[in-house]
Image (tube, helix red, strand yellow):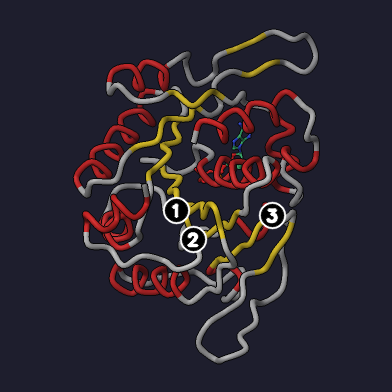
């Protein structure tokens, strides 16, 4: 699949990587990085060889979520070895610059840096490389989706109208550059009160499902708004590895099986 789509679009392929899947959202803060991390871990749990590229250049949160510290090493002065945890190979701009450094690059510099991160990392024989895209549909995102030989994209949205509106823009962007959409993940879909079990649709109900139907796209599943997801992700041990048999981990694994 990757070869067909990328060659069709004239994108230079990436040696050692079979499939590259972008995880994207039209809007920030909807849980794109959390989904990318747990999707990568779920694919690894299924036995696949997986890498995770943090392309969210202005807010690289993957190292923290993956519990990764330290600097990638280079043996030849040109390429870098990814850092690995929980069986997933990781590269992020956050591993190369101090954590509190603000990235104030303009578009062309940011895309150049991201292309380097992608192509100068020694990915070791991957079935899947998951790319956590920067949020939004501006120049950087557009250039990235043109220059990275993507197999397809997963769109993350909350059920909220404003997030859905932006997610629609994301879908249009990938359509424009000929990248297939693999499906839609609805995040923060419902909140279950840990005291009384009452279910509340804080950001609305079924928005992602309806959008998937409207665009004739696969609905990959819904994740609840769940405090454990945040706590475990913030602590560097996301649900799929912290609590592999939980309902939430099962939901992420179900998404992974559909990708
Ligand atoms: P994005 O990449 O879209 O900006 P993040 O994945 O960084 O979003 O998530 C934003 C915040 O929301 C993080 O603190 C994360 O832990 C939290 N979060 C994401 N998904 C959920 C969820 N389903 N339940 C609870 N908290 C979540």
Residue at (31%, 70%) from the top-left corner?
A: 106
Numbered disc in front, either 2 or 1: 2
Mark 1 vs 3, N-terminal side: 1
**From the viewer's perspective, is 145 left or right of 256?**
left
Mark 3 vs 2, N-terminal side: 2
Q: How many marks?
A: 3
Relative depth, front residue between 17 and 88:
17
Q: Position of residue 54 (x, y in %)?
A: 52, 59
Relative depth, front residue between 236 and 85:
85
Numbered disc in front, either 3 or 2: 2
Secondary structure of the residue carrying tag 2 is strand
Q: Position of residue 69 (x, y in %)?
A: 72, 68
User: Badges 1 and 3: C-beta atoms under 8 Å apart?
Assistant: no
Q: Residues within 10 Å of mark 3 (few under 14, many from 20)?
A: many
Secondary structure of the residue carrying tag 1 is strand
Q: Which residue is mark 3?
A: 66
Q: Residues within 10 Å of mark 1 (few under 14, many from 20)?
A: many
Ligand 1 has an atom within 8 Å of the beta carbon of the residue at disc 2: no
Residue at (29%, 56%) from the top-left corner?
A: 6
Secondary structure of the residue carrying tag 3 is loop
Ligand 1 has an atom within 8 Å of the beta carbon of the residue at disc 3: no
User: Badges 3 and 2: C-beta atoms under 8 Å apart?
Assistant: no
Quadrant of the displayed image that contains ligand 1: top right
Res. 88 image quadrant = bottom right
Residue at (23%, 46%) from the top-left corner?
A: 178
User: Badges 2 and 1: C-beta atoms under 8 Å apart?
Assistant: yes
Q: Position of residue 137 (x, y in %)?
A: 29, 48
Q: Position of residue 22 (x, y in %)?
A: 43, 48
Q: Marks 1 and 3, how far apart in space? A: 19 Å
Q: Marks 3 and 2, how far apart in space? A: 21 Å
Q: Which residue is mark 1?
A: 20
Q: Which residue is mark 2?
A: 17
């Amino acid at each position: 699949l990757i070869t067909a789509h990328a060659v069709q679009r004239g994108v230079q392929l990436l040696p050692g990587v079979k499939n590259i899947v972008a995880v994207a959202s039209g809007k920030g803060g909807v849980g794109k990085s959390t989904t990318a991390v747990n999707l990568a871990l779920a694919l690894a749990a299924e036995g696949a060889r997986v890498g995770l590229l943090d392309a969210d250049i202005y807010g690289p949160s993957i190292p923290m979520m993956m519990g990764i510290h330290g600097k990638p090493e280079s043996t030849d002065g040109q390429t870098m070895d990814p850092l690995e945890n929980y069986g997933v190979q990781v590269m992020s701009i956050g591993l190369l610059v101090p954590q509190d450094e603000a990235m104030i690059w303009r578009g062309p510099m940011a895309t150049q840096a991201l292309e380097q991160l992608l192509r100068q990392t020694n990915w070791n024989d991957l079935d899947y490389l998951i790319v956590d895209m920067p949020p939004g549909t501006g120049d950087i995102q557009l250039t990235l989706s043109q220059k990275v030989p993507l197999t397809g994209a997963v769109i993350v949205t909350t059920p909220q109208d404003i997030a859905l509106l932006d997610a629609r823009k994301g879908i249009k962007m990938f359509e424009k550059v000929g990248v297939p959409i693999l499906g839609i993940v609805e995040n923060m879909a419902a909140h279950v009160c840990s005291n009384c079990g009452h279910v509340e649709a804080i950001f609305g109900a079924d928005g992602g499902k309806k959008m998937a139907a409207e665009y004739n796209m696969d609905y990959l599943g819904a994740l609840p708004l769940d405090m454990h997801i945040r706590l475990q992700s913030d602590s560097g041990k996301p649900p799929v590895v912290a609590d592999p048999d939980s309902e939430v981990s099962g939901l992420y694994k179900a998404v992974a099986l559909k990708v």
